[in-house]
Image (cartoon, grey):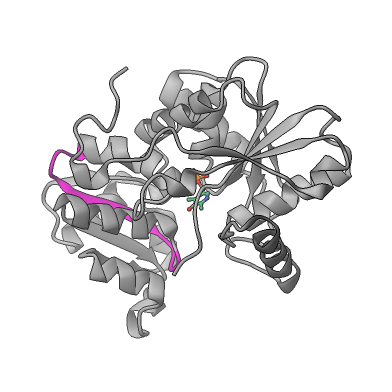
Amino acid sequence: MTSPDASLPDTLRPRLPSPLREAHDVRFARRGVRLLLKRDDLIHPELVGNKWRKLAPNLAAAGGRTVVTFGGAYSNHLRATAAAGRLLGLATVGVVRGQELARRPLNPSLARCVADGMRLRFVDRATYRRKAEPAVLADLLRAADVEHAYVVPEGGSNPAAVRGARALGGELRGAADVAAVACGTGGTLAGLAAGLAPAQRALGVAVLGGGFLTADVRELQRAAFGGPRGRWRVEDRFHHGGYARVPPVLDAFARDFEDRHGLPVERLYVAKLLWGLVALLDEGAFPAGSTVAAVVTGRPFP
Ligand SMILES: *Cc1c(COP(=O)(O)O)cnc(C)c1O
């Protein structure tokens, strides 16, 4: 397998493998469990965390075409794609869910996308839901005036991205009994599970409700590898009300974790992962003597 970064310029050069550090946390120590932090947030200053792992193979495959992708108003994936476009000199187009946003001032996340040169197209929610249908997609590309498009799906999870995320599992081989990651579209979990050693388990903490992630991850593995890979499961109980919902208890938990460990805790994904791990620990889900690795997939924005 060739490294996905072989064809990428210096501006995208990653720090890989990302650092793996033990966090001394009394809650885990009390139960005889070791907690490791896999610092994917340190892979690249602008293409942060799992977004580097998922986007790098796609940027190489784009071969200079305009990268068109999709996301909500606060999408980390849109920001990462826009930053990559600037660093690589690639044109990028972001299709944003919510026609009404076109009439409002841009939020800081979308403003950053525009500052990085991304052209934004706002579409109504009904159209956005159907964006993967060939006719709908063709209309979107025509309306955006894109001739040679390289289309990356919402959240960046396609087979190339899942294969890119497999390296995360490879870096954790033998290092932990359980490797845990927050799940939005599930592409990172699909790759992580595939890269681990057979005795290891991957755990995904869903950051949104709906219960569809297990089926999605299975389908992503089928598309990327031809069938199921590794041992994994999705935990659906810790999304705190849905995507981008950060109630005060979760925010307080994240601030406390930051104080204990000096780690900036991204709220939409990483906070829910860490909360889920502490809750599972309290339920006795991790036996004494075991090691849990939490993947820090991002850092707070701005
Ligand atoms: C995008 C993102 C995820 C989710 O990755 P998926 O592959 O979509 O499940 C997790 N953490 C952070 C910080 C992210 O930005």
Q: Residue at x 32, y 61 (%)?
A: 95
Is residue 254 something that shows in the picture? yes
Foreground residue among 220 and 7: 7
Q: For residue 74, what is the image quadrant?
A: bottom left
In x, y percent, where is residue 236?
Answer: 71, 47
Seen in the image, is 146 located left or right of residue 120? left
Q: Residue at x 59, y 17 (%)?
A: 197
Q: Residue at x 80, y 35 (%)?
A: 33
- Quarter in which the C terminus is drawn: bottom left
Q: For residue 292, what is the image quadrant?
A: top right
Q: Which residues are magenta?
A: 62-74
Count all numbered tags in the image, as a single digit: 0
In x, y percent, where is residue 38?
Answer: 56, 40
Q: Can residue 71 be found in the magenta stretch?
A: yes
Q: For residue 275, what is the image quadrant?
A: bottom right
Seen in the image, is 168 located left or right of residue 16? right
Q: Can residue 11 be found in the magenta stretch?
A: no
Is residue 209 something that shows in the picture? no
Seen in the image, is 249 located left or right of residue 271? right
